[in-house]
Image: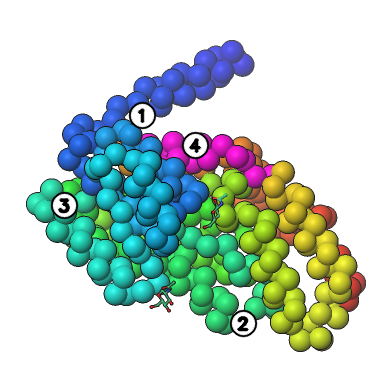
C-alpha cells in the first residue's frame, strides 16, 4: 500500500515536471518589463532573460544600475529610469514601452521592485513610515501594472508579482507584511479579472534570500534610527536589552537564515515568464516550503507562541 502511494507521488511529480518543461516560442519578439533591476533578483533576472533571448526592458532606480546592466548584457536590453512612487515616472516608462513594443504588445511585466525599511514594532512607527513603504511595495506594483495592462492584454501576456512568504503569514511588525498581503490580494483580483482576456497572473513568494531586503546593514541602521527617534516612554517600555537583542538577531540570525542562491528565485521568475504552463504560485526557498507556508496554516495561538519563544525580551512585559 505504502509503495503504491509512493508510486503515485513519484508519478505526480514526473507528470508535473514534463508538463512544465515546454517554453514559449519566439523569445526574440517578446518584450519583458522588469522593475527594480539595480541589484538582487531583478538584476539577475534581467541578465538571465537577456541571455535566453528575450527583449528585456530593465527599469532601474539609479543611474549606476542602468550603466552596470548595459555593460553586462546584449545590445537587445533596454534600460530605463523608474521611480515607482512617481506618477510621471511610471507614465513616462509606459509611454516608452508602448512605443517600443508596437502592435506585438508587452509579453510580461515582472513587479520586483521593493524595499524592506522602515521595519520595527508597530508602536515605533508613524503613518508616514507606513505610507513610504506601501507607496513602493504595494501602490508601486499596482501603478506599474495598470500602466502597461493594455499592452499586456494585447499580447495575451503575463503579470508576475513578487510577494513574499510574509504575504501569507505576518510575524514582524511594520508595513512590510501589510504591503505583501496587499500584493497577494491585488494578484488574486487581477487573476480573476484578466483570465477572460487570456492574461495569466503569477505570484512568487520567496523566503529569506541574501538581497538588500535582508541586508543586515540596512535593517540595523534603520532600527537604530527609529530607536533614537522614539519618545522616552516607548523606549522605557521596550528597554535597551530589546534593542540590542533585535540588533543581534539582524546581525546573526538573518544572514544565517538567508539563502545565497538567488538563482532559486530567478529560475521561478524565468519559469513564470517563459513556460507554456506556468504555475500560479511559486514558493522558492526551503524555509518558505517547509516552515513559513506550513506555519501559515496553523492556528494563531500556535504561531504566536512559536514566535514569542525567540523574541527579544521586552522590559515592561505584562503577565498574561
Ligand atoms: C520619487 O518620486 C516621489 C514622488 O514623486 C518623489 O517624492 C521622490 O523624491 C522621488 N525619488 C527620487 C529619488 O527621485
Ligand atoms: C496569485 O494568482 C495566482 C493565479 O494566477 C493564484 O493561483 C495564486 O494563489 C495567487 N497568489 C497568491 C500568493 O495569492
Ligand atoms: C544593495 O544595494 C547596494 C547599493 O544599491 C549594492 O551596492 C549592493 O550590491 C546591494 N546588495 C545586494 C545584496 O544586492
Task: State yes or no: residue 261 in magenta.
Answer: yes
Whether residue 127 sits left or right of residue 142 in the image: it is: right
- Compared to 241, does 230 lie above or below? below
Residue shown at the point (55%, 81%) measured from the top left: 128
Sequence-wise, the earlier of marks 1 and 4 is: 1
Q: Position of residue 305 (x, y in %)?
A: 78, 57
Residue shown at the point (57%, 55%) measured from the top left: 212
- Residue highlighted by disc 3: 101
* Quadrant where the N terminus is found in the figure: top right
Q: Are marks 2 and 1 in contact (CB under 8 Å)?
A: no
Residue 176, by quadrant, is: bottom right
Find out if the beta carbon at label 4 lies less than 8 Å from the nearest ligand 3 atom. Answer: no
- Compared to 204, does 144 lie above or below? below
Sequence-wise, the earlier of marks 2 and 4 is: 2
Q: Position of residue 80 (x, y in %)?
A: 30, 59
Q: CA distance from mark 3 to mark 4?
A: 28 Å
- Residue highlighted by disc 2: 126
Q: Position of residue 221 (x, y in %)?
A: 69, 66
In this rendering, which labeled residue sits more in front, label 3 or label 2?
3
The residue carrying pointer 4 sits among few (fewer than 14), some (14 to 19) or many (20 or more) residues within 10 Å by Cα, namely some
Q: Tag on residue 20?
A: 1
Residue shown at the point (40%, 72%) measured from the top left: 85
Q: Position of residue 87 (x, y in %)?
A: 32, 75
Q: CA distance from mark 1 to mark 4?
A: 18 Å
The residue carrying pointer 2 sits among few (fewer than 14), some (14 to 19) or many (20 or more) residues within 10 Å by Cα, namely few
Magenta region, main secondary structure: helix
- Residue highlighted by disc 4: 263
Q: Tell me where the magenta segment starts and ends, as one range.
A: 257-272
Sequence-wise, the earlier of marks 2 and 1 is: 1
Residue 121 seen anywhere in this rendered image of the structure:
no
Residue shown at the point (47%, 64%) measured from the top left: 137
Amino acid at each position: 500500500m505504502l509503495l503504491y502511494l509512493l508510486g503515485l507521488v513519484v508519478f505526480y511529480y514526473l507528470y508535473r515536471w514534463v508538463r512544465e518543461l515546454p517554453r514559449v516560442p519566439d523569445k526574440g519578439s517578446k518584450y519583458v518589463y522588469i522593475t527594480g533591476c539595480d541589484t538582487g533578483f531583478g538584476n539577475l533576472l534581467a541578465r538571465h532573460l537577456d541571455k535566453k533571448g528575450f527583449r528585456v526592458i530593465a527599469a532601474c532606480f539609479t543611474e549606476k544600475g542602468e550603466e552596470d546592466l548595459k555593460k553586462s548584457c546584449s545590445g537587445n536590453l533596454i534600460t530605463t529610469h523608474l521611480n515607482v512612487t512617481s506618477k510621471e515616472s511610471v507614465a513616462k516608462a509606459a509611454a516608452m514601452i508602448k512605443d517600443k513594443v508596437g502592435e506585438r504588445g508587452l509579453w510580461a511585466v515582472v513587479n520586483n521592485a521593493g524595499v524592506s525599511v522602515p521595519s520595527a514594532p508597530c508602536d515605533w512607527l508613524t503613518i508616514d513610515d507606513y505610507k513610504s513603504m506601501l507607496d513602493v511595495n504595494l501602490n508601486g506594483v499596482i501603478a506599474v501594472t495598470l500602466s502597461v495592462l493594455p499592452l499586456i492584454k494585447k499580447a495575451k501576456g503575463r503579470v508576475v508579482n513578487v510577494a513574499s512568504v510574509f504575504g501569507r503569514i505576518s510575524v514582524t511588525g511594520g508595513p512590510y507584511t501589510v504591503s505583501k498581503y496587499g500584493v497577494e490580494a491585488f494578484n488574486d483580483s487581477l487573476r480573476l479579472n484578466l483570465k477572460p482576456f487570456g492574461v495569466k497572473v503569477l505570484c512568487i513568494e520567496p523566503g529569506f534570500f541574501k538581497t538588500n531586503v535582508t541586508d543586515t546593514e540596512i535593517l540595523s541602521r534603520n532600527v537604530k534610527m527609529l530607536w533614537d527617534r522614539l519618545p522616552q516612554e516607548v523606549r522605557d517600555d521596550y528597554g535597551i536589552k530589546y534593542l540590542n537583542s533585535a540588533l543581534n538577531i539582524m546581525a546573526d540570525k538573518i544572514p544565517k537564515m538567508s539563502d545565497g542562491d538567488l538563482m532559486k528565485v530567478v529560475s521561478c521568475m524565468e519559469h513564470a515568464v517563459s513556460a507554456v504552463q506556468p504555475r500560479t504560485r511559486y514558493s522558492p526557498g526551503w524555509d518558505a516550503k517547509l516552515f513559513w507556508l506550513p506555519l501559515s496554516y496553523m492556528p494563531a495561538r500556535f504561531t504566536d507562541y512559536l514566535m514569542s519563544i525567540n523574541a527579544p525580551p521586552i522590559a515592561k512585559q505584562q503577565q498574561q
